[in-house]
Amino acid sequence: MTILLLLNRVPYPLHDGGALAMDAMIRGYRDVGCTVHVLAMNTSRHFVARSVVEQLYPQIDSFHCVEVNTDISKQRIIRNLLFSRQPEHLERFTDTQFEQKLEELLNTLHPDVVQLESPFLANCIPVIRRCTTAKIAYRMHNVEAQIWARMAGQARGLRRYYLKILAQRMSSFETAFWSKVDVVIPIAESDIRPIKAAGVHTPVVLAGIGFALKMDRKRRPLTQPYKLYHIGAMDWQANVEAMRWFLKEIWPELHTAFPQLNFYFAGRAMPKEFFEGLPDGVYCAGEVDNAEEFVADKDILVVPLKSGGGIRVKILEAFSQGKLVLSTTVGIQGIHVLPKIHFLLADTSKAIIDALQWVVVHPHLAQCVADDAQSFVGSKYNSSEIFQRLYHSLQALLEKKE
């Protein structure tokens, strides 16, 4: 089977869930014996130097990228709001040169499957249909409309008004998009429900993200005084909101109750506000060169998300590394784990403080939670099994080709 993967960014460095998910897909298809080609946008917002790009993925059959300007423009946002009914994202990820390169590759590679790693590559569908009979797959990282609706619920004033409009547009756009592809491949089981609820009859094949994880059987046990941490892309607004909430409304009381605890956070595109005037016990590392080194000596991953969607790859990664995870309901969605068995659930400031007090008082039980979560990930998210199922599902779809 020949696969052509279309990416809306170069998956490097592997510091966030989106990059990890795309990297897992590339390696997973290769590991089951597919011929794998990649065409990626090298976007201005996540630009990767050509010298680095040339060294990526030597183990696959080809890797191509086209530079695309995806900068956010206030003028374009206003123009889109007034004169379009499409999400503004779709305009940013529409590029003539990228479509020309896609057409060239379709005519020379003759893929069996063309897989889109973002709904904002929807404008590529007419090119694909015109040039090939290949099946079009969509790797669903999350439900975009759900993310923007939750962010609108947290916003105020004009920002709330704009985000509500964007969420409505995204909902209409996604429903139409799901119907245009030949198969949807969601990461999280919870993301199947919106597809069915919208009356979309496109085949769905669930394929989790755990195949990218490396089980660390010799990991460092939880050690007091515990080091709390968070790592994630800070050009994603949901992460910014989460850090603001945690630092302003939770940390002062938490640090008063447990002065021995420290909190470390890192991420790409860290806003300046998080480097200035940090309270005692909080340390901001900004963008780190090596995420594994950053988390190596940390104990508890804190995921205080109040908006967002999809599955948190960083949580699965933390589970595999033997970390204890403290998360909100939104943060843990899509991962079928149990509170106090695999992780600690806390949706309010008081609940977070109570959960950490439980950890401090019951270190042995906290270690058991972390151990059980690691075992769960090792059995539930098996790389080989997930991709074998996906491969056979796609093979069956191809055999139905007229």
Image (cartoon, rainbow, N blue to C red):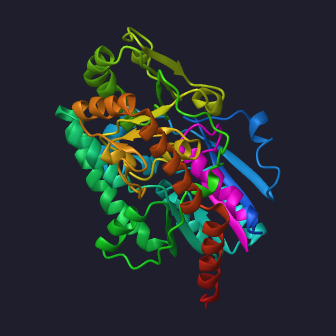
Res. 133 in view: no
Res. 38 in view: yes
Residue 84 vs residue 204, the one in the foreground: 204
Query: Is 25 within the magenta?
Result: yes
Residue at image x 79%, y 57%? 60
Q: Position of residue 274 (x, y in %)?
A: 41, 18
Q: Position of residue 6 (x, y in %)?
A: 62, 57
Quarter of the figure with the C terminus: bottom right
Residue 344 vs residue 60, the one in the foreground: 344
Residue 396 vs residue 252, the one in the foreground: 252
What's the magenta region? Answer: 1-29
Number of marks in the rendered image = 0
Eyeballing the image, is 182 above or below 254? Answer: below
- Could you tell whether 77 is left or right of 105 in the image? left
Eyeballing the image, is 130 above or below 63? Answer: below
Quarter of the figure with the N terminus: bottom right
- Could you tell whether 208 is left or right of 356 in the image? right
Q: Position of residue 119 (x, y in %)?
A: 47, 58
Query: Is 165 within the magenta?
Result: no
Q: Quadrant of residue 263?
A: top left
Residue at image x 26%, y 54%? 168
Q: Quadrant of residue 360?
A: top left
Residue 257 vs residue 209, the one in the foreground: 257
- Could you tell whether 318 is left or right of 37 in the image? left
Q: Position of residue 100 (x, y in %)?
A: 66, 57
- Could you tell whether 147 is left or right of 393 in the image? left
